[in-house]
Amino acid sequence: MKQSKKLAFAAGIASLMLAATGCASSAGSSGAGSENGDATLSFMTTEPKSILPQQDPGSQIGMALCANLMEVNSTTQKLEPLAAKSVESKDAKVWDIELQDGWTFHDGTPVTAKSFADAWNATATGSNAWQGNGTFVAFEGYDKMNPLDGSKATADKLSGVKVVDDTHLQVTLTAPNADFPKILSTNPTCPMPESAFKDLDAYAQAPVSNGPYKFISWDHNQQVVLEKWDGFKAGEGFTGGAKTLVGKVYTAVDAAYTDMTAGNLDMIRNVPATMVDKAKSQLGEESLYEVKTASKQQTLQIPEYVDDLKSPALRKAISLSIDREAISQSLLKGYSAPSDALVPPSLDSYVEGSCEDCVFDPEKAKKILADDGGFDGTLIIESNSASDQQLVQAIGKQIQDNLGIKVQLKPTLGTELSERRNSQKLDGAVFGLWGWSYMSPDQYLSQYETGGDGNAATGYSNPKVDKLLRAARAELDEAKATKLYSEAESIIIKDMPAIPLFIPTDFGLQSKCAQLNDVQGDLQYYRAGYGC
């Protein structure tokens, strides 16, 4: 099967999007924010695969470095123009973009329409192998830069991107997409200065961008240091209160939590449910920040290219063998809800119970499996070793005990797991966390479109689904689009390329100095307030 060229760009796509922070006495120290007024906040991160926004679209570091054309204001929770003055279209296919006047990069050079066009062309170039590449799959000319048959690219620029003048861009898509302004709020659409193209590899180690924080240093496997940029022209809804941000590198959340209890860390994202009560007891209720909008979902994604797992009946049997309610109440202490759909309830397209086989019925599971010919192999479950291993173990044990099949767990470092997923080299199902880059059903369902976002994980393909998703994107009436997305989900769930598991109650941990803030369901370190 042909590998999808379109890679997902949701934060931490299908893997645990874990990050933590703490207080540090100085940017170069390993501690946390100080009450002496240095305004330094530290956060947990794993060793970045890249700090370039276009290379690692879910990167919190990349978000801090970049000011997108559009962005959600953390105060209003509305999508608003940021580096753009306006983004307009009459048909959702041809878009006119006007830039703000007088914006510059951190090095003082001007941000122009060409800065965006050049960055988009570099990201859309298949041979660069940047993960943000798939963002541009719907732009005219993308196919010539990323031929699916393995032939040589016949273009090095997106024909659908036209630089009108220094402050005006015109973008033509292959099909209408009403979500296009939301796409312009994601990391892969960040601009790059002309100097970047002299040596892209060197630039990726020390990027110069236009966001609220500028790059200072990257001590590999130790920390990344960012400093607030005085030249940032946007308001408080797009930045935070820290003068310095220190991303401290951890391989597991437990070590980060230990540092936080010692006063050496300020912030942790995606806190495992198993850690919440302990944090309440040791750090106090005020250390917990509950995200207001549930935007994340834990699933088991099933690669179509793993022959032993191709049967929809096997997938349904696996789903029916998992007692989600028992795990939610016992191991997860009630800080999670069973998932019964391919989208979270916070989206309008959610239909309660759309996954009929997301209930616990071990007898039915065994019968479905027996009628399907049984399963003599071993179900491998791959996961990010940085977190939630207790949860993965509980899921694996239930499948093994209740369905009577062998289960092997395969925890892997996040960077390796991401590479295996994107290159379609997974050995089995993959447990992970999926969250949106912007609030839309398309962020969850497009991964099941042929060649769609994150399609490299499952390789799922269904022409009926493709048609419905294209129609939903083109629909400017939100109510009609919602109905089309729901119809697409009802078809996908019958084949079950992914098994919905849980909708976690999303917590962050914050020190006394850190004041976390979420944006439509996503905690962003660079928007944290400084309270000391």
Image (cartoon, rainbow, N blue to C red):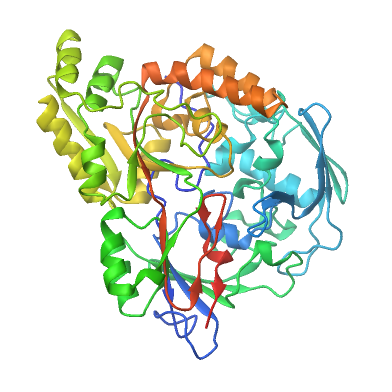
37 relative position to 313: left or right:
right
Determine the image quadrant of residue 392.
top left
From the viewer's perspective, is residue 399 above or below residue 515?
A: above
Query: Which of the two residues, 499 or 166, is positioned nearer the viewer here?
Result: 499
From the viewer's perspective, is residue 56 above or below residue 250?
A: above
Residue occupying the point 66% across, 42% down: 182
In the current view of this chain or complex, which residue is farthest to the right? 165
Q: Position of residue 405 (x, y in %)?
A: 12, 26
Determine the image quadrant of residue 308.
top left
Query: Number of marks in the image?
Result: 0
From the viewer's perspective, is residue 46 above or below residue 37?
A: above
Q: Position of residue 139 (x, y in %)?
A: 69, 31
Residue occupying the point 82% across, 46% down: 86
Residue occupying the point 69% across, 23% down: 474
Q: Is residue 211 visible?
A: no
Q: Position of residue 399 (x, y in %)?
A: 17, 31
Q: Position of residue 190 (x, y in %)?
A: 67, 51
Query: Which of the two residues, 70 or 327, is positioned nearer the viewer here?
Result: 327
392 relative position to 10: left or right:
left
- Image quadrant where one finds the N terminus: top left
Residue occupying the point 31% across, 51% down: 413
437 relative position to 117: left or right:
left
192 relative position to 272: left or right:
right
Q: Is residue 445 visible?
A: yes
Determine the image quadrant of residue 204.
bottom right
